[in-house]
Every structure is written in C-alpha cells, then in structure tokens.
Image (cartoon, rainbow, N blue to C red):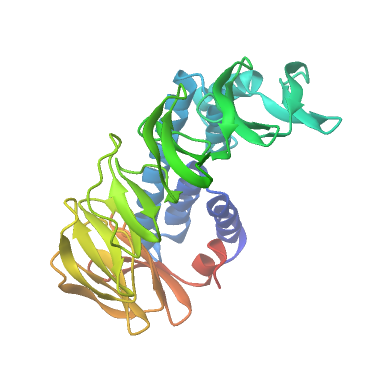
Amino acid sequence: MRGKTSDIWDKMKFCVKNENYVLTSLFYEKLIYNQNTIISSSVFELGEIIKNYAVGEKEMADEAFDNKYYEDAFSLYEDLEYEGCDAFITERKTIAKQKALEVFSDNGLVGFIDKDKKVVIDCKYDEAHDFMQGYALVNKGGKYGMINRSGKVIIPFIYDFIFPHFRCGLTPALMLIKGYKKYGYINRVGELKIPFYFDRAIPFENGFAQVAMNGAWSIITPDGNNLSSFVYENIGPYSQGLIAVKINGLWGYANIRMRIKIKPKYEYAKAYSEGLCPVKMDGYYGYVDADDVVQIDFKYNEAYEFSMGSALVNYKGTWYFINKREVIVYHGDYLSDIFNMK
C-alpha cells in the first residue's frame, strides 16, 4: 500500500490500539473506498463489527454523563472524540472535563482539584483513586472507604479493600473477621448485603459473581444465594446460559442451575458466546456448541470468544478474524501489529 491508503492504515492501527472505535470505523470505511474490490468485503465486515463497539461506547458515555458521573463520561467521550467528530460529543466532552475532578498530592497526602486547579477536596487521604460512578475509593490510616464528589464519606473507612466500581448495585469489600480477612458485598450506601463469608470474590457480571471458600469456587446471585456447593477448582463468568467450570484439572460447562452441561474434558475453556465455546484440547483451540459438538476444529494456537459474528484466533503465529463458517474476515501483518501480538 502506498500514499493515502498507507496513511489510513497507520491511523487505523493507532486508533484500534487505543480503543478509539468510532474513528477506527471511519478509517475502515475509507479503506473500503480506497481499496475498492481488493479487500473491501473483508474490511467492511470487520469495520461493521468495530462500529458496533463504537455505538456501545457512546451509549455508556451518555449514560455516565446523564448520571453526572463526569469523570467516567469524560474518559469515554475522549476515546470517542476525533477531529471533525459531531458537535454533540465535543460539547459533552467539554462539559464533562470542566466538571471532572482529578487527584493531586501535597505533603504526602492526596485530595482532589477541579479543572482550574482549585482544591475541591482537601489533601487528607493516604491514597486516592479516580472517581468512578460518582464515588472515589480512598484510603485513610490503612483502611479503605468511599467518598462522593463533594467529599462526603459515603462508605466508612473500615475495609481492607473495596473494588472501586459497582455492578448490580454491589461491590466486593474485604474486612478482617475473627482474625481472617473475608469478602462480602456492600451496596452504594455502604450497607452490607452479602455477609463476609468468602476468601475471594469477583465483581458481579451478567447478574452473577464468582466466590471462593477454602480453595473451592461457587457462583452467587445479588441476593446472596449460592447456585451450587463449593466444589469447583475454578469457575468462569456466567455468559449466555453457560458457565465454564474446572473439576479435577479439566474444564467443562455448567448451566445456570450449575448442572454439568458439557463434561469437563478440556485443558481450558473460555466464556460461551453466540452459540460457541472456545475450548482447548491437546494444546490447540477449537469451538464447540452447547451440546459439545465440534463446530470449528482444534487447530488454533489461541482463540477468543465470538462477538457480533466474529472471533479473533491465532493460527501458526498469524492472527485472524474468522466468522462462524470459519471464513477469514481479515488477517495479515497489520492485524498482528494492531493487537501487538506478533
């Protein structure tokens, strides 16, 4: 490729690496126009995928802005913004930036300032994280709590750690209980909703969370109900009706009732998505359906979940996007460069 087309490729690669999907999709459209029939069909298919990511990112940005989570909104709009983008994104990004607070330090302590470097929250914390969903995780005297954007303590400084974002209205919190550090789940006003039972706890995703006790894993709902006894060596996130589980060193899948749907026999199993499971056997990845029928043969060195009809795979050192018919959507050195995997 030479001249204008080569320049578009370079800009596209930079934007994908930085997850600027709106701009990336426009570069793909330009490639379609410049490359004409040479690679237009494969580039168009991949471009459509990335445009869908951009739409999702804009929806998240708008939701954060409407909820006055200006720090989250600014970060998302900044990813979306590009030269010549629509005025709506630019305007909202500007407003979010003006209202966002940032961490600053003074004499070994940290607080928050606004865009004019005016102190909004005094430096009185030993550690502070950026605001997320309207709250900032802060540490004072070795204990963690959360404050709102006016500096009011919402969650008291009694925890050994708190995950800084809420899902399903809850987040895991770590606390010393009878001499042992245990995880429970608290809500946005600091109320304990799921008691401190767990040795490990993961934030909720798709309505479920993985938790561990005595080296074994289970999965729970936001009301604290266990969907199984603690019998699994490891467990993946719930996705579209199936959960990857590890028993006796091998991976399989359970359904939402935690009944085995695909017998554990794989070296590794990733999240079930769009009707297919990426699984590893004899050192190679392939894809099986929910009935454990092989749909894509075991020949890939690496394979990821399908999303919007395509999946990223590595075959003999080269990265490809394939569709469910195992037709290559796109491949080549540029893809390896984009994902920095070559």
Residue 233 picture location, percent across and down: 35, 65
Residue 303 picture location, percent across and down: 37, 69
Q: Is 76 on the left or on the right of 232, as rendered?
A: right
Q: Nearer the viewer, residue 124 or 282?
A: 124
Q: Nearer the viewer, residue 127 or 75?
A: 127
The residue shown at (79%, 30%) is 109
Query: Visible in this render: residue 1?
Result: yes
The residue positioned farthest toward the right in the image shown? 107
Instruction: Report the quarter where the N terminus lies.
Output: bottom right
The residue shown at (41%, 36%) is 185
The residue positioned farthest toward the left in the image shown? 291
Please identify the quarter of the rendering in which residue 326 is found.
Answer: bottom left
Q: Is 277 on the left or on the right of 201, as rendered?
A: left
Q: Relative to 122, say whether 55 is above or below.
A: below
Please identify the quarter of the rendering in which residue 54 is found.
Answer: top left
Query: Visible in this render: residue 90?
Result: no
Please identify the quarter of the rendering in which residue 100 is found.
Answer: top right
